[in-house]
């Protein structure tokens, strides 16, 4: 049976978070929170069940940032930036594993 997008996402997030052994507990928590928000974003757009690393293109990342601003407001730019940092670190992690399409970094 083929793995669902949600299962694939959760599997990669778990592997990513496990790789953060040398990071501070605060960094771990920050990245985890950002990825929880990204999962919520994907579900809200009906994209979670078919999610694959290849779907991480510039448009999706920009949509997530816009969604964060709408959720938290412009006055909470630091919060938005913190949540986006978790996704950026995750994207770098899966890029190092060769799972992203060309041009996505």
Image: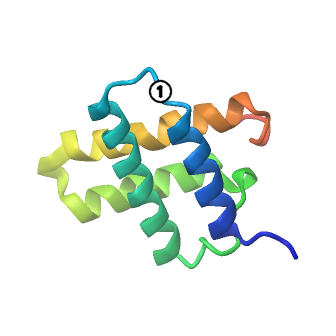
Q: State the residue in front, 10 or 48.
A: 10
Decide if residue 98 is on the left or right side of residue 60: right
Residue at 69% from the left image edge and 68% from the top image edge: 5
The x, y position of residue 73, in whole percent, is: 18, 58
Residue at 50% from the left image edge and 40% from the top image edge: 17
On-image quarter of the C terminus:
top right
Identity of the residue furthest to the left in this view: 75
Res 59 seen here: yes
* Scheme of image coloration: rainbow
Q: State the residue in front, 88 or 73.
A: 88
Residue at 39% from the left image edge and 37% from the top image edge: 85
The x, y position of residue 100, in whole percent, is: 74, 41
Q: In this view, does 24 lie above or below 42?
A: above
Decide if residue 52 is on the left or right side of residue 27: right
User: How many labels sit on residues?
Assistant: 1
Q: Is residue 102 above or below residue 45?
A: above
Q: Residues within 10 Å of mark 1 (few under 14, many from 20)?
A: few
Residue at 71% from the left image edge and 28% from the top image edge: 96
Q: In which quarter of the image is residue 6?
A: bottom right
Q: Is residue 6 above or below residue 64?
A: below
Q: Mark 1 points at which residue?
A: 21
On-image quarter of the N terminus:
bottom right
Q: Label 1, secondary structure: give it.
A: loop
The x, y position of residue 11, in whole percent, is: 64, 55
Res 90 seen here: no
The x, y position of residue 27, in whole percent, is: 33, 32
Q: State the residue in front, 9 or 95.
A: 9
Identity of the residue furthest to the right in this view: 1
């Amino acid at each position: 049976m083929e793995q669902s997008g949600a299962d694939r996402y959760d599997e990669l997030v778990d592997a990513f978070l496990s790789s953060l052994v040398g990071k501070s507990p605060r960094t771990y928590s920050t990245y985890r929170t950002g990825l929880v928000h990204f999962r919520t974003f994907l579900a809200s757009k009906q994209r979670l069940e078919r999610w694959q690393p290849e779907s991480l293109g510039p448009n999706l990342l920009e949509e997530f940032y816009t969604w964060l601003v709408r959720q938290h407001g412009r006055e909470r730019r630091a919060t938005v930036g913190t949540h986006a940092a978790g996704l950026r670190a995750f994207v770098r992690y899966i890029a190092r594993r060769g799972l992203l399409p060309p041009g996505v970094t």
